[in-house]
Structure formats: structure tokens, C-alpha cells
Amino acid sequence: MARLNQEALTAAAVAKFDATPDPSGEGDLTCERGALIIAAEQADLKSAFKRAKKIKAGYRWVVINREDLFGANPLSLGSKAGIFDADGNMLKNADVPRTKV
């Protein structure tokens, strides 16, 4: 599969997950599985996982181009965010969301 830009990766996520724009603005999209943040370029990965850490409730997912997995995986540590590719394949499972006490 060819590398997708931000617009194409967003369209793929909308199609695969029946996602809609996130009304809270915390994520880019929201779906049954939780909040989705789109990171089409390697330069976007760090900020995507920082945004994921700030989401207060529910599962957090970052949607990436599959080629960026080795750059994304270390950044995902401690974020509790999972990783999906453009085809909807789960590359890393999201941790169970917990409420802070």
C-alpha cells in the first residue's frame, strides 16, 4: 500500500471505523473503539502521542501509515494509546482506560 497523506489516512479511518469528527476536539475522530488521532507523517508521531495522553476518558488510538510502526512504537510507551494502520489492522493494543483518583 502506498503511503497516505493526512487527508487520505483520515478518509481511510472514517471508512474502516465508521468514525465521525470528535466533538470534544481531543481527538481527530471518534468511533465505537474510542478516540482516533491521525498521524500521517513521522514528524507528526510525537505530537499525536502527546495528544493521546491528554484524552481523559475511553480508549485512545493513533492511526499511522504501517511503515511508521518502528518510529511510533517507542513513543506509545506510557501513553496508553494503541496503534492502527490505514487498513484497520491493530498494530498495538490500547491499555484499558482508567480514571485518575
Image: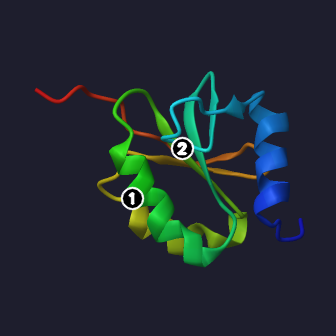
Q: Tell me the SS state at disc 1.
A: helix
Q: Residue furthest top?
A: 32
Categorize mark 1 by other alpha carbons within 10 Å: few (<14), some (14-19), many (20+).
Answer: some
Q: Residue at coordinates 29% horizontally, 54% vertically from top-left?
A: 78
On residue 19, which mark appears? none
- Residue 10 in the image, given as x and y percentages of width and height: 77, 49
In this rendering, position of residue 67 left or right of residue 18: left
- Residue 96 in the image, given as x and y percentages of width and height: 36, 30
Task: Give, as a three-letter code, the residue at label 2.
Answer: Trp
Categorize mark 2 by other alpha carbons within 10 Å: few (<14), some (14-19), many (20+).
Answer: many
Q: Residue furthest left?
A: 101
For the image shown, how many numbered marks are present on the structure?
2
Whether residue 61 is visible here, answered yes or no, is yes
Quadrant into which the C terminus falls: top left
Whether residue 87 is visible here, answered yes or no, is no
Instruction: Give the Cα distance between marks 2 and 1.
Output: 12 Å
CB contact under 8 Å: marks 2 and 1: no
Task: Give, as a three-letter code, the residue at label 1.
Answer: Lys
Query: Would you place residue 23 above or below residue 27 in this image?
Result: above
Q: Residue at coordinates 40% horizontally, 68% vertically from top-left?
A: 74
In this rendering, position of residue 70 left or right of residue 95: right
Can you identify the residue that label 1 sits on?
A: 50
Pick the front one: 8 or 93: 8
Q: Tell me the SS state at disc 2.
A: strand
On residue 61, which mark appears? 2
Quadrant into which the N terminus falls: bottom right
- Residue 35 in the image, given as x and y percentages of width and height: 54, 35
